[in-house]
Every structure is written in structure tokens, then in C-alpha cells.
Image (cartoon, rainbow, N blue to C red):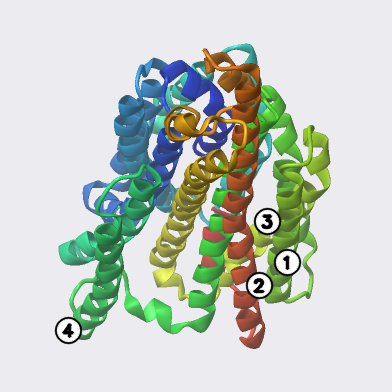
Amino acid sequence: MFVLVVDTSLMNVSISAVIDDLDTTASGVQSAIALEALISAAFILINSKVGDLIGRKRAYVLGLVAYAIGALAMTLAQSLAAIVVFWAVIGGLGASLLLPAMQSLIHGNFSGPAQKQAYALVGAAAAIAAAVGPLLGGFVTTFLSWRVGFGLEVVIIAVVLTQVRLIRDVPYTGSRAIDLVGALLSVVGMGGVVLGILVWQEGGQYVVLLLVVGAVALIALSRWLIRRQRAQRVTLLDPRLFRHPNFTAGISGQMLQQITLGGAMIALPLFLQMTLEYNAMQAGLSLAPLSLTMFAAAMVAGRKAGQRRPAAIIRIGFVLASVGMAGIIPLVPRVDSGWWLVIPLVVTGAGLGLLVSQLNNYTLAPVEDERISEAAGVNSAAGSFGLSFGLAMAGGVMLAALSFSFTHLTEQSTVIPANEKQQIAAALENDAEVMSNTELDQRITGQPPAVEQAVLAINAEARSRSLQLALLVPLLAGAAGIANSFRMMRLPDLKPSSAAEQAGLG
């Protein structure tokens, strides 16, 4: 679990180094990050069933091996294509096998207080990884190499695999029938929506078609599940779960929280590394107020919530996250140091920490013990889908705004010769995609000093505008979360079952 969480932090803080080493683009790396989250979300429900059929321990080992292959590919990759195939696709599939199998194995290998402690340790590992991930990733990337960080992941997984004999397999006694149509519709639905955004981000075709196919597949999935459940046949997931208003409100909150986090974690590292021209270590240190406060708030709120309503804490969490993001947006074009971001990042981190402390248990509270594993899988899928959507949408908005701003600002320039405006705008759009002024200055050749300064000014202004618009994605998700929390406040509080608490901790 520690490796799974650190992996994403490492990729985010090292994005500038990855772009330079592989001679690729920011949008390409962003797409790979979003695709990895999407693959994990789209296949987690299916691979939960696969783990039931082939054996939970075998699924756990296969997931570890697949994830190690993705990490190993990162240490050796010489092109973006290798990252997409091995890290995003194979690694994402590994994560979707690993997570539900791990939960089932903990449930079957421990009982009573020991089981709750085991779930708590897994949750603590994830929280610690989220807190130290940016710092660890920044240190390794700056003083060694981003490839070393992924190599260390392989080493850790290898150590885990050497001790896998200590794990007792947990047999599955339920139905072995598979809902193939439901599985296909879930993949096409979530995949179509996020892939549509990624294709738009890359300037590709058939964007609307992909989005429509994804939306239609999700609608068809809901109808299919209801029809199949009425016929008393096996379904990918039980549609009766969504009859619980607390569950649907919690799932919505989980997804919005992850959209907020995903949007912030794609835009903020780019701001720090491209605008402020920080290295990975400096970027990791600058993001530490968010991750450390998130960890601290989650721990404190989890223990000290007392008799406070979970819905009220969730509302405060979304308010703080939204206020923090709103505070960062006006600072983007005006600051020259990460110190200016400390207070809004602390506020954002406190909000996200409050959400982490409450949302899982709130969502799973109305679910019966025998269906908790299925409900937890839906909860995880919603979170992973929200993360991939936030990453893709923020990246897409940023690059679309950047493209428009390059063209608009170049046309408005009184310094650039009229006969060169179109050429310079096209060059900026194609070659200066999310590029620092220092890097761009090294590429500008054969232009008068006044024109060079005008081009650098256009790049700086366009980059700031695009990052501000990208940060609107997490801000709007936070605002939607506030609206959803008012619905939560109108619903009665439900005490989570012991199984729900354990699933929430895991």
C-alpha cells in the first residue's frame, strides 16, 4: 500500500525530469498518469471477481508482479510509449487486482481485534505515504534520479514476494458465474468518459463520440444491472446498494474529493516546476504543507471526531478544500516563491484530511456485513474514477487554455511582426507546451531582442492563465462537494458495522 501511494507522488513531483529525459510533452505524461488511475478504476470491480475465481492469494501475487513490471519499465523506459503500456496499463491492471485481493486476504487471515489492527496498519501506511511521498520523490529525483525511485519500488515488491508464503489463501465460496456484459459496460463507460477527455487534451479526433459512448454505456450499465437483478441472475455489482441514500451521497462525495485532489496534483507540480522553475526536491518541499496537513488532519479527526456528525465534518472538509484552492488561483501569476502557497495549501490539506477521515465510513455505514466487500469495491472504483477524471480534466483545460492564449496574445502583440505572428503562435503551441521561460529562452534563435522578450512574456502570461483555469477544476469539484454535503446533512446518521469500519480503514 505504501508503494502504491508513493508511486503517484513520485510521478507528480518528477514530471519535469521525466519530460526532459524522455524528450516528451507535459500532456503526454499527464495522460499516462490519468490513464493509470483510469485502468485501476475501470477494472477493479472485474478483477475483484477474477480474484474470487483464481484465488485471492494468486490474484495478490499477480497484481504485485504486474505492478513491479510497471515500476521496472519506468526505470528502463526510453519513450513515453513504454510508460503508457507498462506503467499505466499493466501497472494499473496490477493495482486493480492487488487492492481487492489484499482486502480479502486481510479479512481471511485475521479475526477480532487483530483484523481491525491489520486494516488500520494498511490505512496508516497509505496515509504516511501520502504525507512523505512528495518529499521522498523530490529527494530521490533531485539527488539521484526519478528512475531510482521506481527501482526502489521494485525492490520493496520483491521483498514482499519473498515473504508471500506467510499469507494463507482465503477460499471463495460464492457463485462462480460472471456478468460479462456488466463488466464490459463498466469498462466502456468509465473508459469512454476519461479517454474522451484525454483525446481532447491531445488534440485528437472523435472526442464527442468517445464521451457519448462512455455516457451511454454507463446508462446502459445501470439498466442492465437492474434488469439482471430482477431476473435473480449474477450481477457485476448489486444495484440495490444504490437504494441507500447515504451510500449514493457518500460515493458522490468520494468521487468529488478525488477530483479535487487529482486536479490539484496535476496543476500544482507544473506551476512549481514550470513557472517558479523549481527542481523536484523544491517542488516536493513546497507541496509538503498540503500532504503533511492532510495526514495530520485525517489522524486527528479520526480520533477526536467524538459526537460530531460525520456529514458536518465532511461539509467543513469541502469548505476548507475549496477556500484553499480559491486562495491559490490569484497567487499563480503574482508570486515568485512557494512560500506564498503555504497557508492556502495548509487549508486545502486540512480540508482533504477531514474528508479522508470520514467519507469511507460514512459511505459504507448503511451496507450489510455480507455485502461490504462489494460496496468497498464500488467505493474504491468511484474514488479512482474521480482521480483519473480530475487529472484528465485539469490537464485538458490547462492545455486548451494554453493553446488559445498563445494564439490570442500573439495576435494582440504590437512588437511581433505581422507576417511572423502565425508562425510564432504555432511554434509556441507545438514546442513551448508548459515550458519555463528559461527553457524557452534557450530555444529562441534568430529573433531581435524585443521579439524574444515579447515571446517570453506571452509564454509567461499564457502559462499563468492556463494554470489558473486548470485549478478551477478542483475548486468547482469542491463547491459541488459542499452542495452534496447539504444533502448528507438531511440524511440520518448511521453507525458503521465492524466490517464497514475495517473496510474503511483499508
Q: Amino acid at mark 2?
A: Ile
Q: Nearer the viewer, mark 2 or mark 3?
A: 2
Q: Tell me the residue that label 4 is attached to.
A: 231
Query: Which of 443/93 is in front?
Result: 443
> Do labels 4 and 3 touch, CB within 8 Å?
no
Q: Judge from the rendering whether residue 44 lies leftward or rightward of residue 360; answer left or right.
A: left
Q: Position of residue 82 (x, y in %)?
A: 31, 25
Q: Measured along the vertical axis of the image, is residue 258 above or below residue 448?
A: below
Q: Are marks 1 and 2 in contact (CB under 8 Å)?
A: yes
Mark linked to residue 352: 3
Cβ atoms under marks 1 and 3 closer than 8 Å: no
Task: Tell us which disc is closer to us: 2 or 4.
Answer: 2
274 over 303 or under it: above or below: above
**Which numbered disc, 2 or 3, marks the residue that appears first in the sequence?**
3
The one of 432 and 208 positioned closer to us in this rendering:
432
Residue assigned mark 2? 482
